[in-house]
Image (cartoon, helix red, strand yellow):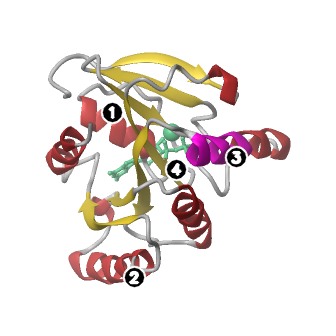
Amino acid sequence: LFAGETEFLKGVVAMDGLPPADRTEICFAGRSNVGKSSLINALTNRKGLARASNTPGRTQEINFFTAADSHYIVDLPGYGFANAPLKVVEAWQRLLKAYLAGRQSLRRAFVLIDARHGVKAVDEEIMTLLDRSAVTFQAVLTKADKVKAAEREKVLAQVRTKLSKHPAAYPELIVTSSEKGWGIEDLRAVIATLE
Ligand code: GTP
Ligand code: MG
């Protein structure tokens, strides 16, 4: 799936700007700064494809990428704290929720969880929305390079407990580091099974 070039298609700021729902679509959701854009860059082997930054709130549109003429890979704005004006943040949070709840072609949402912090209240809110919309989601731990193994195990246990309460959660977790390349091959393999 990621053997060829993944290309940027468009940035969407309103539901009526979404491309036709005619491809297999997967998206990356998660709190601001959790590492969504970095993970897409690691997956696609293209450093600057999705814009990543230290400033929470870097991704402010729903960014569509095309992979292998068959898939859309979608980079979402973060939720929770963001370094942007409240009105702007509220607008993109509304769009994010409308997208997650109403996108026909969305096959799976990857919900990214920082390996240092575990599942927070805002993550649960998104998970509940996905439950209600019957969108299967899968948790991906990010920035695993930033924690020691013991701490990682503790967070993993917390995440598993939280996931068990969500009917739309896919039980298998993926542990990643975009920095070190950990788990990237596993994630590619999972995505390749979705059609
Ligand atoms: P928003 O678009 O603002 O919601 O953020 P995002 O979730 O897209 O995060 P982004 O990919 O921009 O990464 C945020 C910061 O975390 C950047 O400084 C990245 O370099 C850093 N980062 C991302 N992934 C990793 C990782 O696996 N390990 C480490 N150490 N840093 C990471
Ligand atoms: Mg981003």
Query: For residue 41, which numbered disc appears in the image?
Result: 1
Hey, which quadrant is residue 7 in on the image?
top left
- The reply to whether discs 4 and 1 touch (Cβ–Cβ < 8 Å) is no
172 sits left or right of 3 in the view: right
* Disc nearer the start of the sequence (2/3): 3
Nearest-to-viewer mark from 1 and 2:
2
**Mark 1 C-beta to ligand 1 under 8 Å:** yes
Region in magenta: 93-102
Residue 77 in sight in this render = no
Point 58% across, 37% down: residue: 58
Residue at label 4? 33
Mark 1 secondary-structure assignment: helix
* Disc nearer the start of the sequence (4/3): 4
Q: Tell me if residue 130 comes above or below residue 71 in the rendering.
A: below
Hey, which quadrant is residue 23 in on the image?
top left
Mark 3 secondary-structure assignment: helix
Q: Nearer the viewer, residue 125 or 182?
A: 125
Residue at label 2? 158
Residue 20 in the image, given as x and y percentages of width and height = 51, 20
* Disc nearer the start of the sequence (4/1): 4
